Image: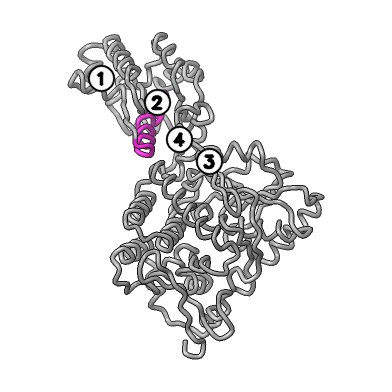
Amino acid sequence: MSLFLVGMPGAGKSFLGRKLSAFFNIAFYDTDDIVEKRVGKEIKDIFSEYGETHFRKLESDALDYCLSLEGDFICSTGGGILENPSNLEKLKGQNTVYIRKGFEDLLQDVGKHKGKRPLLSGNREEKLRELLVRRGPLFDVFPAIEIPSHVFEARDLPFIIYRIHKYYRDFIRTEQTMLEGVHTIQFAPLNVLEIIENRAENVFLSDSVDILYGKMIGKANRFVLPDGEAAKTSDSLNDSWNYLIERGITRGDTLFGFGGGTVTDLTGFVASTFKRGIGFEFIPSTLLAQVDASIGGKNAINIGGVKNVCGTFSFPENVCIDPLISLSTGELELKNGVVEGLKVALIVHADEVILTNQLERAKKIITHPTFDALNNFVLQAVKDKMRIVNDDPYEKGIRKYLNLGHTYGHVFETTYHISHGEAVALGMIKKLGNSRNEIIREYVNFFRTLFTEDLNVLKREWTDRMTQKLFNDKKNTRDSVVFINLNEPGKAFIETVNKETF
């Protein structure tokens, strides 16, 4: 697992190399850094005292050192390293990518380091253009990727990593895991985009997913839904059915839901009711959908502000999960997902080691996500939920425990228009906030840190309209409100409250 980065000065090779090495938890080397440490001088001083020819010899030696290394690492190379034909040939035999950036962006970036790039002293713009003309054909030998010109975020990593993986599949070694049960789950790190390209047709996806990945799907084969809960309305349902009628979809066809939980909820409901049921598969794009919404065959829409009040139990033929894709959805969606993943861990496990590991992975995903933390968190959460779903697919018993935090959460979500994970976190804080159990307190305190700004929701006045929403929750009986409670991890129980005394 090694990768070499080449490109012009200012392209961001070292910046990206450090980001990738941190994400994959592997070593990072920079040929310029190696030269400076060996000589004990900065590059500009080496140029000044010994000349460019001597520097190029030192640079080539640094590359040879990196080529001799074993194990996993990423190496960023100097901008002129390919002008040595020997170096070019050596890097042709390695996993090497060209970090490409437009001229104006390059000029802006090198301007931030005036005096540190000796070949660009004087008329910087003219000399940079000359270098680009001379070196451009050398760089073009290798597959090119681009770093966003905006402030780099974790959400930018998937596009870069997918592109690298497309050209160099041995750079990141992954294994697929098939989980069997009431439906199949294909846990496939770094393979979901390939699956979409090769298999998916009749794809339902949201606006935001269409913007990010729609180019991979032919226009005739996708139906774009609004983002968020707007996808789960009766209007969207009717539009979806009409789309399938217009497309001439038969019971032998398969519908793909590619997106977050609202997309998978609607797609499953549409497929399970169209012509009394057609096949469907899910490709969940958000962390929340990967660990919760896409798993277990619950499909629904909202009516009159009541969450999931009309729906079906109908199981997908397959759910393909690639945790990396969830990073592209941003921090809030990651928070939503870790809440649901931690919720199911509390329900399933009494083992403190498992619970602590899952909590630590969740913290890492939010602060400094890594490939291993993301994959291990999702795989554990998926196994946890499937453990419950397999035992109780139609929610007659223990599957009801998965509603921990949801009775209050759905009211908060529809009243204050906050995200699902945020609302469920507040629901668990409200229900478990005074727990005497240390692990439960740790989880609840983490939820508080995730949504510090919205804790005031719990202090707001409870209204008659909120009570009406609570009473309409689908889990309730005619006379009682049903809550899920937890005194100890792994020991959830049903708690009923008479509506007259609520």
Which numbered disc flags the more N-terminal residue, 3 or 1? Answer: 1
**Which residue ends up furthest to the left in the rendered image?**
40
Residue 3 falls inside the magenta stretch: yes
Residue 39 falls inside the magenta stretch: no
Amino acid type of disc 2? Ser
Amino acid type of disc 1? Val
| Real-space Cα separation, disc 4 to disc 1, in angstroms | 25 Å
Which numbered disc flags the more N-terminal residue, 2 or 4? Answer: 2
State the extent of the magenta-drawn residues as a range. 1-25
Q: Which residue is mark 3?
A: 188
Q: Which residue is mark 4?
A: 147
Q: Are marks 3 and 1 in contact (CB under 8 Å)?
A: no
Image point (56%, 44%), residue name: 186
Which numbered disc flags the more N-terminal residue, 3 or 4? Answer: 4
Toward the viewer: 96 or 290?
290
Q: Is residue 122 visible?
A: no
Q: Which residue is mark 2?
A: 2
Toward the viewer: 368 or 116?
368
Above or below 150: residue 308 = below
Instruction: Check disc 2: other Cα within 10 Å, few if <14, some if 14-19, many if 20+.
Output: many
